[in-house]
Image (cartoon, rainbow, N blue to C red):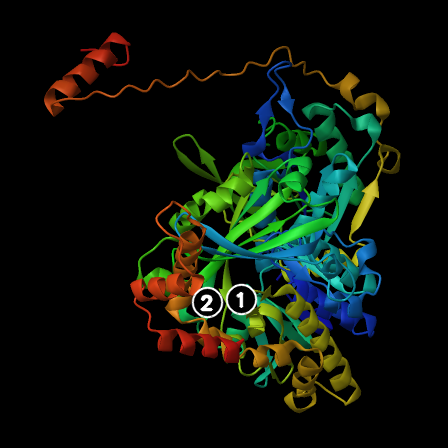
Amino acid sequence: MEKFEAIVVGAGPAGSAAAYGLAKAGVKTLLVERGKAPGQKAMFGGRIYSFPLHAMIPDFAKDCPIERYVTRENMAFLSDDTALSVTFDAPKLGTGAAASFTAYRAKFDAWLAKKAEEAGAMLITGIRVDKVHRQGGKVAGVATNGDVVLADVVIAADGALSQLARSAGLRGDPSPEEYSVGVKETVELPQKVLEERFNLDEKEGAAYVFAGAASASLRGGGFLYTNKATLSLGLVVSSEDLAVTRTEIGTVMDRFRRHPAIARLTKGGKVLEWSAHLVPELGRAMSPRTYDDGFLLAGDAAGFLLNVGYTFRGVDLAIASGMAAAEAITRARTAGGYSAGNLAVYERLLKERQVTTDLETFAQAPFYLKNPRLFSVYPKLLNEIAEKVYTIDGTGQRKLSEVARAEAKAAKVSPVRMLLDLLGGARAM
Amino acid sequence: MAPGPRSIVCIKQVPKAQELQVDPVTNTLKRVGVPSEINPPDRNALEMALQVKDQFGGEVFVLTMGPPVFTSALEEALAMGCDRAFLLTDRILGGSDTVPTAHSLSETIHKIGGYQLIFCGEETTDASTGHVGPGIAGHLDCAQITYCSEVQFLGNRVRGKRSVEDGFETWECPLPCVITANFLSNRPRPPSLSGKIRVKRGGLITTWSCADVGIDPGKVGIRNSPTIVAKVDTVVLPDRKAKIFRGEPKAAVTALLDAMAADGVLSR
């Protein structure tokens, strides 16, 4: 029977980072991916924050398949036919450890898995692993179709629904309130057209988040990222809201794409690809326990995803948690074995690498973001105020404060309610 | 119980049928850039041989003849559970039709030696001749059971159930024996994780040239292939017409039937 010291399931950012760290430390590691190639089954919004890569591979930018560095952040509130936007122009965000870049997962994941292979991990693709193998009650490997491969320790980096974490008893069955649905279109534009339209130079990129009518006023929002010659345009919407209102995400996406503010940005583009994915939303609440005897969770499998409304992080937390998992294993190895007691250091390493720290800082965000007024009333209200303020038609111009008061009244939100929502937001965010 | 047999499975790598297109100018199949796979009936042959090994022990070797890219088919067969693989590859084999192919494979099987069973798919999806299995039996001067759906190893004989037009025949043959497997006669197993790990560790594939095997260059290649492809026709599908018949159901149906009769689709 085949035997490894460590098996990592899932060659996404979490799994490949873990396998890389393990192989570098001389641990005999197997990395198993269900896609025919790493990245083939992966989907995300479009942007990666680079800080954990700096720590992992200092010269990563040399060959990492980066599309564009994000140098302009945009946030827009949409009504049905108008948009109120805030733009933050900061070329300095495109450099250093704080840099974020746009990418294709098919390329990025393949690149990262290659790094793990080069470091000495064995990569096997085209095999789906959905069960841990137990010996004497302990995790002792993985099982697929009756075929068993043994290992002293297993890392589940198998994504948002993590069959493996469920088979090991660290997570329960998924339920709609834990997840959003993400959908994305990859829209092709000639590079020159894209750069002129978004006012970017060759390396620069823009990121957008859209709130309000983008998600048909359901909890969630839209996003757009610029790649070299394509746009990543998509939505993330609460699956619970979709279920309750019996809305199909495809319909929401159709309407979003046709919104005047979006149609202008994608005009003439050709849709190359359509993809969808589940997005874990409840952070630490999704799997309070991240390790067990001979077993660790990393990335989406552990619920390590952070959506605070204006930033959206997943790949960075996945990489950082994968590295933390590798380090936890090498420390447990030095300590004499992979018992839960020895692997408990994982939690401390997750904190040190700012994975769980950031998740805990924003622990209340998912609950604050449950407030439906944020997605329906306020974006609309902001647009209506803007419309009144900018409409000069000879019927008399009013002060901004008067307009705001009148519109708030028309929207039937009391000033107290609004103040409480604002304070709630300030506290959670 | 007698020890299990050594089986040799002959496979071919073919372009994926659903991805194939005919070049409208040259009327030949466009093979460049088309993803390839193990010839689907050969998968059934592999599964048949592996089932014999599961039940009776022994070992399963896999053999292919073709360019080095055929290695990926061998790797997949190994990951399914074959013990060793052999690749016969040589430029002088280029353009071989089924006569030199059967000859070259037989010579290679002879060199491997020690075999009791030889498995092939019933035919390939890219040429559909079904010649090679019987050709090998001819060259090796041994028994053959073609179009088999079930095989039982009996120690010194083999029993095979073969499909014929109006039912089945069951044959018992002495060893060695060539078996060609019916397409879809079983559910081929997927490659396993341990199988893929074994492949990755390497050392399971033996590559031979014609000289290594001792194949006479005067018997192979395009010049020694009697088949001439004189003409390839492409079936041009007629364009579909879309016409909506409106009005009262009865009148609309009558109008539809009349129109179909007028087009010669129906006779009334």
Quadrant where the C terminus of chain B is found in the figure: top left
Label of residue A371 in the image = none
Looking at the image, residue B249 sits to the left or right of residue B73; the answer is left
Q: Nearer the viewer, residue B57 or A356?
A: A356
User: Which residue is the site of mark 1?
Assistant: A160
Write down the residue under mark 2: A179
The relative height of residue B110 versus residue A42 in the rendered view (above or below) is above
Pick the front one: A74 or B190: A74
Residue B240 or residue A34, whichever sits in front: B240
| Three-letter amino acid code at the position of disc 2 | Tyr
Residue B87 position in % (x across, y down): 77, 41
Chain ID, mark 1: A
Look at the image and tell me whether residue A40 can be seen: yes
From this view, report whether residue A29 is shown above or below residue B130: below
Q: Nearer the viewer, mark 1 or mark 2?
A: 2
Quadrant hosting residue B70: top right
Q: Residue at x 59, y 16 (%)?
A: B24
* Mark 1: amino acid: Ala
Residue A79 place in picture, x, y as percent: 41, 53
Q: Name the element at disc 2.
A: strand
Pointer 1 and pointer 2: residues touching (CB < 8 Å)? yes
> Is residue A124 placed above or below A6 in the rendered structure?
above
Quick check: A70 above or below A272? below
Q: Quadrant of the N terminus of chain B?
A: bottom right
Label 2, residues with CA under 10 Å away: few <14, some 14-19, many ≥20:
many
Q: For the residue carrying disc 1, how many other residues have a C-alpha within 10 Å: few (<14), some (14-19), or many (20+)?
A: many
